[in-house]
Amino acid sequence: MSSVAEKLARKSGRKPATTKQVRLKLVYVDFWSAVKLSFLVALCLGIVTIVATFLIFTVLNGTGIFDKIDALYTDIAGSSSDLASILSIGNVMGFAFVVAILNTVVITALGAVYAVLYNLSVKVTGGLLVGFTNN
């Protein structure tokens, strides 16, 4: 049994369009949804920061770059300085952890601010026109 749409398509004699386009206006961004999404994005970026810092430190330490920098620093500053203790894995990863936490807080706050600013600007501009298709 055929549907009403198929019967109308046969009567019209035209080939039915395979794609449909819809134009919608984005007139509101939910504040809590924006905060949750920005928090999750910031959390992922924080994890990437910590992992990338560990990998870069491991590669640089394995190639001996820190030893060469320490020798250069000792030549310039004198024999009483020890750069290797400053650039230990604990200090570097601690710094990466603090940066990741600060970035998480800042990116989450920026997501909330952007949601509020967009909702205020919609009153002036009317929203963002978005087109969709069903390919």
Image (cartoon, grey):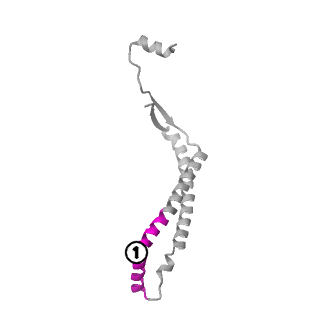
Q: Is residue 56 magenta?
A: yes
* Closer to the camera in the image, 126 or 30: 30
Which residues are the magenta region? 52-78
Q: Is residue 94 left or right of residue 12?
A: right
Residue at the spot x=39%, y=85% of the render?
76
Q: Could you classify mark 1 by the number of other residues whose Cα lies within 10 Å: few (under 14), some (14-19), or many (20 or more)?
A: few
View extreme (front): residue: 62
Residue extending furthest top? 11
The kind of residue on which mark 1 rests is: Ile
Could you say which is closer to the camera, residue 32 or residue 115? 32
Magenta-highlighted stretch: main secondary structure? helix
Could you say where residue 132 lies in the image, as x and y percent from the top left? Answer: 45, 33
Residue lying farthest right?
32
Which residue, given by chain and number where applicable, does mark 1 sit on? 65
Which quarter of the rendering shows the C terminus? Answer: top left
Q: Residue at x 46, y 36 (%)?
A: 129
Near-viewer residue (50 or 101): 50
Q: Is residue 32 magenta?
A: no
Residue under the image location 59 percent in, 45 percent down: 33
Quadrant of the rendered image containing residue 17? top left
Question: Picture coordinates of residue 86 (x, y %)?
Answer: 50, 78
Q: Secondary structure at mark 1?
A: helix
Q: Identify the residue shown where x is 42% and y is 79%.
A: 67
3 in relation to 18, above or below: above
**Place of residue 1 in the rendered image (x, y in percent of width and height, measured from the top left):** 52, 13
Q: Residue 105 location in percent, x, y? A: 57, 58
